[in-house]
Image (spheres, rainbow, N blue to C red):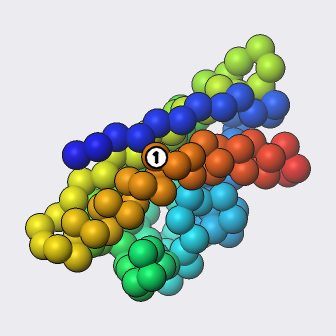
Amino acid sequence: MRTYTATTVAPVRPEAVLDVLTDPEAIAVWAPVPFSVDDLSHPRLAEGSRARVSGRLAGQEIRFDVEVHQADADGLTLSAHGPVALDVAYEVRASETGSHVSASVAVLPRRGLRARLFAEATGAMLASGALQLALGRIAVRAAAV
């Protein structure tokens, strides 16, 4: 398992950040990996909600089942299970200039060559700054709301 982290300060209140973190349409814009939501149990990500998402990684179509564990004033945590398992956490805290946002993505490879390929591709993308870029897009989107 490898964990990738990033932080940023958004010039908005934590509620605005959480709004962007839990809006499926907004997530498709800021997410580190482009994807589409194929099925969602609630209109927004909420504790206990589930979603099925799909996208492309390393030139291959991938699908994940997503389960939201927390979506409240403190942030968002979820797990995604597909060819790679992901444990994702976005923590949001009020700061003097708006909100301090930190993100953590743990990549857990599954068995098999294809799973290892996806884990390596995911890790390479996150290590190259995709998570930090996503936080920047979250801050911009939250400020525009």
Q: What SS does tag 1 mark? A: helix
Above or below residue 132? Residue 13 is above
Query: Would residue 84 be seen by someone viewing this image from the given angle?
Result: yes
How far across and how far down the image is residue 125, in percent? 48, 57
Give the image quarter of residue 97: top right
Tell me which residue sits at (69%, 65%) in the image: 29
Q: How many marks?
A: 1
- Identity of the residue furthest to the right in this view: 144
Q: Give the amino acid at mark 1.
A: Ala
Q: Specify few, some or many for label 1: CA neighbours under 10 Å numbering under 14, 14-19, or 20 or more.
A: some
Tell me which residue sits at (42%, 55%) in the image: 124
Tell me which residue sits at (17%, 74%) in the image: 113
Query: Would residue 18 be seen by someone viewing this image from the given angle?
Result: no
How far across and how far down the image is residue 17, in percent? 69, 42
Write down the residue under mark 1.
127
How far across and how far down the image is residue 74, in percent? 53, 32
Judge left or right: residue 67 versus residue 116: right
Which residue is nearer to you in this view: 121 or 21?
121
- Identity of the residue furthest to the left in this view: 111
Tell me which residue sits at (60%, 42%) in the image: 132
Above or below residue 19? Residue 59 is below
How far across and how far down the image is residue 36, in percent? 56, 78
Judge left or right: residue 73 versus residue 81: right
Judge left or right: residue 29 versus residue 89: right
